[in-house]
């Protein structure tokens, strides 16, 4: 596998996904009962935006670097993300960018459980070190492990807590990635039908995305919504035109809030006439 997230960390898709992740974690924390947070494709958790790989990728300019994180956001979800980033950067450095495991670690409570699976052993070891480095800022002990995220998803559900938030964020380099998700979703929901599952997907050609979403709607029955933010026309298969999130069993009012903060984010990212955002149910409540 060639994929390294360090070339892409902090791009607009990461920002979109990470605001949503924090909003989902906050929504699940409204109930006192603990839950399992499972990150099936975790990465190494911390990235150097001034490092060679980030500079080569050059994607942060249209992402995190485009945002003035010191200017207050109107949407609490975006503000929460800015605050988490600022808090983490006090330890990890001003030019660092946290991945989903470290962001989640700041949001999880003592009685929640965090488990982050990464296929590349070296990245998983680095992730554990990065999690350890911010342990003082997380009341929850979050663990990293080497493995296949899809296999671990099946093995870990249902969790003892009977509540789970799963983030599935694959690199989409393997030809069978979409097919694996189509198998993993019903399998996970068979084990825990209330699991909240967020799947990130690239928006290149909207037509291709819609065909895949139609397949998703045929293999599961749980309420599911799709949120997309795009910065470029969605008609070229080559580039990353937009960022998409499929959310199964979305917590209450996540849809209306998503519509509001996605639009604020689009404007803050300098979106022009080619950009847009939408939120729609593909399986209704
Ligand atoms: C897009 S990155 C993850 C980024 C991370 N979720 C974040 O937001 O910071 C995808 C990661 O999945 C890993 N990966 C690829 N296939 C995997 C699999 N089957 N199981 C677990 N990890 C996998 C890659 O090595 C890569 O680090």
Image (spheres, grey):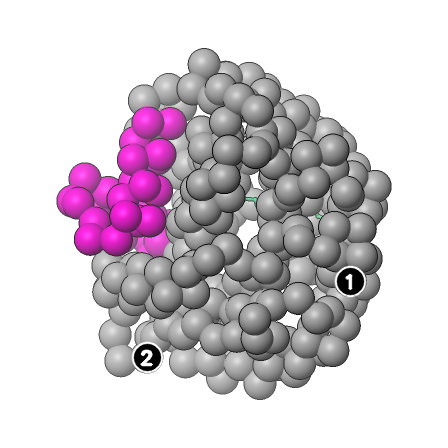
Coordinates of residue 124 in the picture (x, y in percent): 68, 30
Q: Which mark is residue 274?
A: 2
Q: Quadrant of the C terminus?
A: bottom right
Quarter of the image for residue 95 reads top left
Crowding at mark 2 (Cα within 10 Å: few <14, some 14-19, many 20+): few
Coordinates of residue 192 in the picture (x, y in percent): 74, 50
Magenta segment range? 59-88
Pointers 1 and 2 in contact (C-beta within 8 Å): no
Coordinates of residue 137 in the picture (x, y in percent): 43, 19
Quarter of the image for residue 83 reads top left
Residue drawn at (81%, 47%) of the image? 154
Whether residue 58 appears in this view of the structure is no
Residue drawn at (43%, 65%) of the image? 255
Number of numbered discs overlaid on the protein picture: 2
SS class, disc 2: loop
Q: Main secondary structure of the magenta part?
A: helix
Residue for badge 1: 186
């Amino acid at each position: 596998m060639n994929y390294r997230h360090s070339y892409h960390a902090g791009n607009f898709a990461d920002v979109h996904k990470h605001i949503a992740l924090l909003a989902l974690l906050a929504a699940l924390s409204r109930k006192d009962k603990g839950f399992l947070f499972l990150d099936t494709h975790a990465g190494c958790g911390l990235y150097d935006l001034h490092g060679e790989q980030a500079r080569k990728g050059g994607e942060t300019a249209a992402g995190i670097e485009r945002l003035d994180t010191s200017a207050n956001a109107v949407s609490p979800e975006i503000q929460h993300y800015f605050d988490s980033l600022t808090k983490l950067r006090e330890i990890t450095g001003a030019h660092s960018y946290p991945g989903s495991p470290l962001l989640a670690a700041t949001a999880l409570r003592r009685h929640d459980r965090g488990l982050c699976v990464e296929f590349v052993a070296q990245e998983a070891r680095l992730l554990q070190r990065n999690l350890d480095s911010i342990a003082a800022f997380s009341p929850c002990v979050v663990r990293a492990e080497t493995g296949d995220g899809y296999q671990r998803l099946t093995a870990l559900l249902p969790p003892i807590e009977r509540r789970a938030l799963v983030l599935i964020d694959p690199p989409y380099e393997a030809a069978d990635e979409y097919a694996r998700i189509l198998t993993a979703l019903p399998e996970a929901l068979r084990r825990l039908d209330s699991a909240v599952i967020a799947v990130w997907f690239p928006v290149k050609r909207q037509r291709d995305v819609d065909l895949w979403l139609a397949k998703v709607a045929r293999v599961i029955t749980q309420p599911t919504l799709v949120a997309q933010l795009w910065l470029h026309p969605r008609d070229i298969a080559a580039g990353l035109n937009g960022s998409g999130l499929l959310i199964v069993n979305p917590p209450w009012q996540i849809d209306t809030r998503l519509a509001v903060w996605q639009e604020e984010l689009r404007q803050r990212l300098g979106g022009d006439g080619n950009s847009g955002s939408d939120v729609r149910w593909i399986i209704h409540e």
